[in-house]
Amino acid sequence: MIKYTSEIAKATDPLFEKVKNVIPSVEWPTMAPLVHRINELKAEKNAVVLAHNYQTPDIYHCVADFVGDSRQLAIQAQKTEADIIVQAGVHFMAETSKLLSPDKTVLIPSLDAGCSLAASITGQDVRQLKKKYPGVPVVTYVNTSADVKAESDICCTSANAIAVVEALGADRVILLPDEYLSKNVAAQTEVEIIAWQGRCEVHERFTAEELRDYRESSPGVSILAHPECSPEVLEEADFAGSTSALIRYVNVNRPQKVMMVTECSMSDNVSAEIGEEVEFIRPCNLCPHMKTISLQNIVESLELIRHEVTIPEEIAARGRQAVKRMVDLEVEGKGFEKRSNQRDVIVEDRASVSSLGTLSH
Ligand code: 13P
Ligand code: SF4
């Protein structure tokens, strides 16, 4: 264990200033030596830490070189000149970085950093779907394995899902694997959507009723929701968008009271930045996968070059194409406007496509 020396205190005090609203000062001496060590290791090894918006404030504000939503992190992975990328996020994000930066070493500090959406579908499921809907383009949410991306025409994130679906110019699109995101996209476009029965275990837990109760008990609260929540939850919200769009909304609009209907660290990270001006009402859910990343395992990952992400080249080549198509489209925008336009969406699952027999490719 590294000691909290006066030298470390001096070097890390400016970082503590950034998080002192959300990290108790008694906890800082346990964090500062690790923060200091990570920052040393990054310089020694020419490494960068790409941190998702759901990372805890110690990682997000004190060791990350870039922070953002899935789309922004993918763009940074492609741009960085570092030799090593440490992905402070979940495994599919690290795989996306590896697809876009195949010559770099990409590390994921915890092998338990999965995602319920990524676990909901396999490449074989997508092959079966394509057999059921021949010729229908497949748009895949980045929250999937490289194997699933490899079966797709193009990827999307919550920041650009509507725009990507519309950019294809097709009447009908398969949008995988988040049932709720797909239904929320369907409510915003004329394109017919075929969905998959995947769910985010964090966002599916929020209910519209819960939001109505909060509105009643906190009059004037602005409710912001991630589009992985159910359509009923989005209808109750004042604004919906990617994690970065939600952060931007708070920064620009400075609501007096805000509720971020998403993962818990979002409120902490924004609150650390803007202080007391905005009151955060915090009924949030923790993502157990994101929370497996810690200062300790980032240190170990960098010291030992541990948990390197590798993707078999045959899969990587096709997965890369789907991610690059999305990045090259350079579309963001087109948010989830507040309008009740729920449309019927076909929702497929493994049972509904497996009766079609096995398709080799
Ligand atoms: P964003 O792309 O909006 O950051 O979402 C990623 C995610 O995993 C949300 O649960
Ligand atoms: Fe996956 Fe949901 Fe966690 Fe995002 S919050 S990484 S979608 S389980």
Image: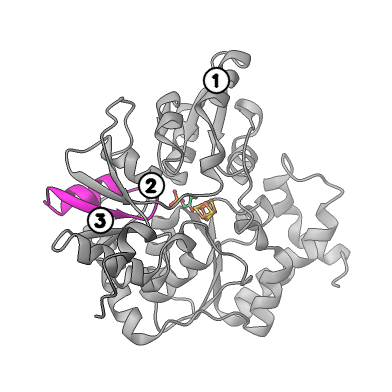
Amino acid type assigned to the residue bearing label 1 in the image: Val
- For the C terminus, the image quarter is bottom left
Q: CA distance from mark 2 to mark 3?
A: 25 Å
Mark 2 and mark 1 residues within 8 Å of each other at the beta carbon: no
Nearer to us of marks 2 and 3 is 2
Q: Position of residue 220 (x, y in %)?
A: 54, 15
Label tally: 3
Could you say where residue 171 lies in the image, as x and y percent from the top left? 12, 47
Residue kind at label 2, given as amino acid type: Glu
Please tell me which of labels 2 and 1 falls first in the chain.
2
Give the labeled residue for mark 1.
221
Mark 3 vs mark 1, foreground winner is 1
Q: Which residues are magenta?
A: 159-178
- Mark 3, Cα crowd under 10 Å, few <14 / some 14-19 / many 20+, is few
Q: Secondary structure at mark 2?
A: helix
Decide which of 357, 262 is in the foreground and name it. Answer: 357
> At 47% from the left edge and 66% from the top edge, which residue is drawn?
92
